[in-house]
Amino acid sequence: MNRIVCTLREMGYRLTPQRRAVIDALSECGGFTDASVIFGKVRLTNEHISLDTIYRNLKLLIELGVVNQINNPRSDRTLYELITDSPHQHAVCLACGKIECIDHCTEMVDNMVRLASDGFKVVNHSFEAYGYCAECQKKQLREDKNDSGI
């Protein structure tokens, strides 16, 4: 929480009660969650908060690099994750929606270091790999075999 508060202040923002509630809700959820779950948790302590306020605060926290936004192009569901450790990337299964965290890609880190040395200030980055997890691939293979009569 201290890192987030420092980031907000460095960028000229205050830790409002609404922002604190969104951050607390993300922290309580752990992993990945959607805005409606965050909204439900925040409403338990702040019944007057709107879903629009949740989205505005999520947008700001993403821009400040303290929250990740993960999109699944096969669904309308956008998930959010509080960044509690070093930045990382994600692998998203297009079938079941499972998300796996990936440690730094060496080449991506090298490119960000190069950008920084050229005077570009990186404040956030995002990378998602989309595909099919091993379990969904096996399931599809079984379905294909059943459809072909094998």
Image (cartoon, grey):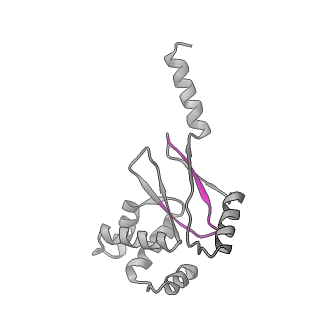
Residue pushed farthest top?
Answer: 149
- Residue drawn at (36%, 65%) of the image: 40
List x then y, in percent, for residue 79. 46, 57
List x then y, in percent, for residue 65. 53, 71
Q: Is residue 46 left or right of residue 90?
A: left
Q: Is residue 17 left or right of residue 1?
A: left
**The N terminus is located in which quarter?**
bottom right
List x then y, in percent, for residue 47. 29, 74
Indicate whether residue 11 is drawn in magenta: no
**The C terminus is located in which quarter?**
top right
- Residue drawn at (36%, 67%) of the image: 55
Q: Is residue 35 left or right of residue 6?
A: left
Rendering quarter of residue 20 = bottom left
List x then y, in percent, for residue 103. 67, 58
Residue pushed farthest front?
Answer: 118
- Residue drawn at (58%, 54%) of the image: 90
Query: Compared with residue 96, is residue 85 higher up or lower down, i.e. above or below?
Result: below
**Magenta residues, start to end:** 80-94
Rendering quarter of residue 84 = bottom right
Rendering quarter of residue 17 = bottom left
Query: Compared with residue 20, is residue 94 higher up or lower down, i.e. above or below?
Result: above
- Residue drawn at (40%, 61%) of the image: 37
